[in-house]
Image (tube, helix red, strand yellow):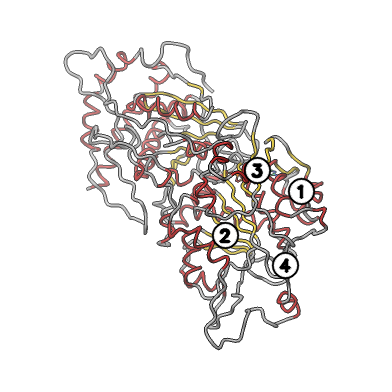
Amino acid sequence: MTTAAPAPTLKKEKTAAKLRYLNKKKIRRKANQAAAPKKKKRRVEPGEQDAKVSGGGDRGISSSSSNSDSSDSSESSSSDSSDSDRDEKIEKPEKPEISENPEIPNIPEISQEIPQQPPQLPLLSFPEPQNLNVASTEDLKKLGLPDVFANEISIDANQSFPSTQAHTLGLGGRLSNRLIQIGFESLFAVQLAAIPLLIGDMNDGIRHPLYPAESPRDICVSAPTGSGKTLGYTLPIVEVLSRRIVTRLRALIVLPTRDLVSQVRETFELFAKGTDLKIGTITGQQSFQQEQAKLVGQTDTIFAGGSSKVDILIATPGRLIDHINSTPNFTVQHLRFLVIDEADRLMNQSFQSWIDRVQIALTTPIKIPPRTDAHDALGGTNKHDLMETFERPQRGVQKMLFSATLTTDPSKIRSLHLNDPKFVVVRNEKVEDYAIPSTLEERMIVSETAYKPLMLLHLLYQRGVKRALCFTKSVESATRLMHLLRLFNDQVGNGPTVASFSSDLSPQERQKMLTKFKDGEVDMLVSTDVIARGIDVQGIENVINYDIPLDMPKYVHRVGRTARAGLVGTAWTLVEVQEAKYFKGYTKNAKHQVKKVRPTTKEVEPLMEAYDVALSRLGRVYNQGDS
Ligand SMILES: Nc1ncnc2c1ncn2[C@@H]1O[C@H](COP(=O)(O)OP(=O)(O)OP(=O)(O)O)[C@@H](O)[C@H]1O
């Protein structure tokens, strides 16, 4: 890794840089003309919150929240089109247009005289740092929500527990062996805390409380990104349900995006191997009828107890509500576990008041048409079924909320009607409002908008950043940046192979792209926030925020794609001069120390020639694309 030369800084050397630009003025003008984008139509997924680029491309402040596809907008269910981060976003002032070409930096027209000052970018008003939505325990008590937080269990993130001893937490031999087979020799802190709470008290003699005597306590878990929350609920669910006799829908896991649903399904399949538990997903990727057939089978009879072909269902909220509303025999009455993963984001989704809808469905029996005798799809078909017909009625679902940035908005939490909840917080040694992995290094480069692409090239070609996830503010920015990086690499070689990832891709294309990234066929993905939450790809060494995240929770989730499961990683944020106050404000408020890195002109200069050519070619690409 090349280290930054001590002095002089980029800012001091800007006049020298201008001289270079003077010589390149003609090339750039041509490029500007060539690249001036005509408005291009692109495919809009159903319900997609379209990303509009106000001619900004790589330049300027992230425009309004509609620029981002942080929602998993490709989900075809009308309902899931609302699976978005929209509610979390901060309204930003509209950015004035600076130039016709979004990719080409804002190089001022140079007159006869050499300007003494650096180019003056319009200083835009930026929103003041907002209060973070982490309320203190005291505040919450005042708001009448004491229990969750008074019952807080704080766990040191560095704690672990040997998998060989997992039986003492309530996990059976099969799962302990599976952990060791997979190479998970110890359980992480969050798993150590959550498993006993979900499996039940070992001392009361109920080893596998599929039907607990008492209504189980709910839990809220806040633990850093990459700390193993998924296994924190997968293991106890598989353990408890593996004792079930007949198939009923007993565990429901709700996640905000399809990509996360697929990922969590893989984890369940890995650990349910060797049991006969049936795992299903509903995301709108298949037709509604196909999903119905997989969920409840095909029958015209309505059963009071409903029917189910799956024990564990992993769903996006919109599609879940569609089935609750319209699929005969689909019922959540028998649920033993309800997991809301990425809970803060899901609780912000107002679509059809999905939480209230699920809450009602939990307590409403299926309506049987008159004269239907059958009371349960399981009725009397075999010995096991009969046994379960006489089992004790369900004492209530156990709800679990998981997130790295768990909201403590009392009104939202209250709507879940949690039962005497326990609040589990996994902390590392740093005292931060939003805990991040202790193995993560945070760095920023403050740069004028015009130089941001060069700063990125500096990271990739001079600081050895290769395997990375790079976040932009919009789909268009991601695509253009990808092209620019490819064109640059065509000239100099040895750079990372780059691809873009966005909601513009079909679900199948997205899966393929993720696989390529996982397999190392692609070194760097340029993406919007669509991939910022929950996605787990091993070996991502760096996260680059090419455009700053809109707020601290988004920052935490983006940078949390690296430094996972105890591995090291670095987060780089390219901050435009006019954004610096805002960015430093929210990171400082959350007690994060983001180190400043200052590349010099001398360092960056060798990149400029190839960069100019790449820009010029980019202009031609876009021009041809439009003709
Ligand atoms: N006990 C364990 N031993 C080794 N690796 C583990 C263990 N538990 C989880 N992991 C691995 O750690 C990685 C991160 O886990 P996971 O995706 O569950 O994190 P998370 O806390 O849900 O993160 P995020 O908040 O970003 O969604 C995964 O690759 C997972 O396989």
The alpha-carbon separation of the residues under discs 2 and 1 comes to 25 Å
Q: Mark 1 — residue?
A: 180
Q: Secondary structure at mark 3?
A: strand
Residue at image coords 60%, 54% = 418
At label 4, the amino acid type is Arg
Label 1 or label 3, whichever comes before in sequence order? 1
Label 2 or label 1, whichever comes before in sequence order? 1
Residue 231 vertical placement versus 539 (above, below): below
Label 3: few (<14), some or many (≥20) within 10 Å?
many
Ligand 1 quarter of the rendering? top right
Q: Are marks 2 and 1 in contact (CB under 8 Å)?
A: no
Q: Mark 2 — residue?
A: 314
Residue behind label 1 places its C-beta within 8 angstroms of ligand 1: no
Comparing labels 3 and 2, the label whose residue is closer to the camera: 3
Q: Position of residue 382 (x, y in %)?
A: 73, 81
Q: Mark 3 — residue?
A: 424
At label 2, the amino acid type is Ile
Residue 84 vertical placement versus 78 (above, below): above
Label 2 or label 4, whichever comes before in sequence order? 4
Q: Are marks 3 and 4 in contact (CB under 8 Å)?
A: no
At label 3, the amino acid type is Val
Q: Mark 4 — residue?
A: 244
Comparing labels 4 and 1, the label whose residue is closer to the camera: 4
The alpha-carbon separation of the residues under discs 2 and 4 comes to 18 Å
Left or right? Give the position of 406 relative to 49: right
The alpha-carbon separation of the residues under discs 4 and 1 comes to 24 Å
Comparing labels 1 and 3, the label whose residue is closer to the camera: 3
Label 4: few (<14), some or many (≥20) within 10 Å?
some
